[in-house]
Image (cartoon, grey):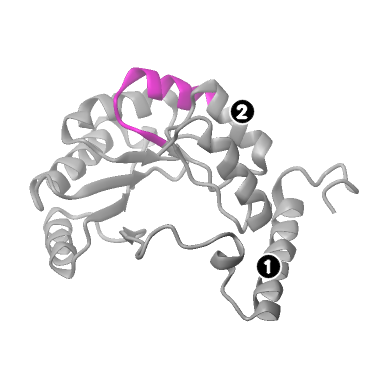
């Protein structure tokens, strides 16, 4: 499927291939009456930690503090919040984005990992300015600060501040991941098996990524 169509490299074509590949892995698991992770080898840990993710959640100061403490009481050690403003919101929007990080760090304390997602909505200048102001609060990562096509913006952000840079939901195949890693654009690879080419391709992406020692 990949080789037979010149347009299959990114986008909807590869997403369709992903669906077929994942379905074949599911069928193989059903045939052998086992779970897919055993087909891939074996478990490497007894449990997998999850984090709280809150797209569209109210970012009002009191709402954030209350939800942050509730999550801590529920046992979540890591949380991901979505930043609602960008360059078009001006200095006040930047202030709100920085204040959110400050509140989330001070409310639960230093034991909580904080992750942020910018919806690919920032530009390079804005992302660097935000990262320099919040790196004192030690975010675990900033996800998709720019559109995936703007690889140079990710490179510049990594060089300018200490906040780890994440991207990859919209990676299509191991070759795109390798280009990002070779250029020093990301700290965290987030390839999605529903989009990147399926589980088969994700295995190859993991092998490529392992040579760069990402998070």
Left or right: residue 44 compared with residue 106: right
Residue 100 x %, y %: 20, 45
| Residue 51 within the segment the image draws in magenta | no
Left or right: residue 215 compared with residue 199: left
| Residue 161 within the segment the image draws in magenta | yes
At horizontal 10% and vertical 53% (from top left) the residue drawn is 108
Residue 188 x %, y %: 43, 39
171 lies above or below 184: below
Task: Give the magenta range.
Answer: 150-165
- Of the pair 15 and 65, the residue shown nearer to us: 15
Quarter containing the N terminus: bottom right
At horizontal 47% and vertical 34% (from top left) the residue drawn is 146
At horizontal 35% and vertical 33% (from top left) the residue drawn is 164
- Name the secondary structure under disc 1: helix
- Name the secondary structure under disc 2: helix
| Of marks 1 and 2, the one in the foreground | 1
Q: Quadrant of residue 62?
A: bottom left
Work out whether residue 150 can be spotted: no
The tag on residue 179 is: 2
> Magenta part mainly helix, strand or loop?
helix
Residue 107 x %, y %: 9, 51
Q: CA distance from mark 1 to mark 2?
A: 27 Å
Work out whether residue 125 can be spotted: yes
Left or right: residue 19 compared with residue 115: right
């Amino acid at each position: 499927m990949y080789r037979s169509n010149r347009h299959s490299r990114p986008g909807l074509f590869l997403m369709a291939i992903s669906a077929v590949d994942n379905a074949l892995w599911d069928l193989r698991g059903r045939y052998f009456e086992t779970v897919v992770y055993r087909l891939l080898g074996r478990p490497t840990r007894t449990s997998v930690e999850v984090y709280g993710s809150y797209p569209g959640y109210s970012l009002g100061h009191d709402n954030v503090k209350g939800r942050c403490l509730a999550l801590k009481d529920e046992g979540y050690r890591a949380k991901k919040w979505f930043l609602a403003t960008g360059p078009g919101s001006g200095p006040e929007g930047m202030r709100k984005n920085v204040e959110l990080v400050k509140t989330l760090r001070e409310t639960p304390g230093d034991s909580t990992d904080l992750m942020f997602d910018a919806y690919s909505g920032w530009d390079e200048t804005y992302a660097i300015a935000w990262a320099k102001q919040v790196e004192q609060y030690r975010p675990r990562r900033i996800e998709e600060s720019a559109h995936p096509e703007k690889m140079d913006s990710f490179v510049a952000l990594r060089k300018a501040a200490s906040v780890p840079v994440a991207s990859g939901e919209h990676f299509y195949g191991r070759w795109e991941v390798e280009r990002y890693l070779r250029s020093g654009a990301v700290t965290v690879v987030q390839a999605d098996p529903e989009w990147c080419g399926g589980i088969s391709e994700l295995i190859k992406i993991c092998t490529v990524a392992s040579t760069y020692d990402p998070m």
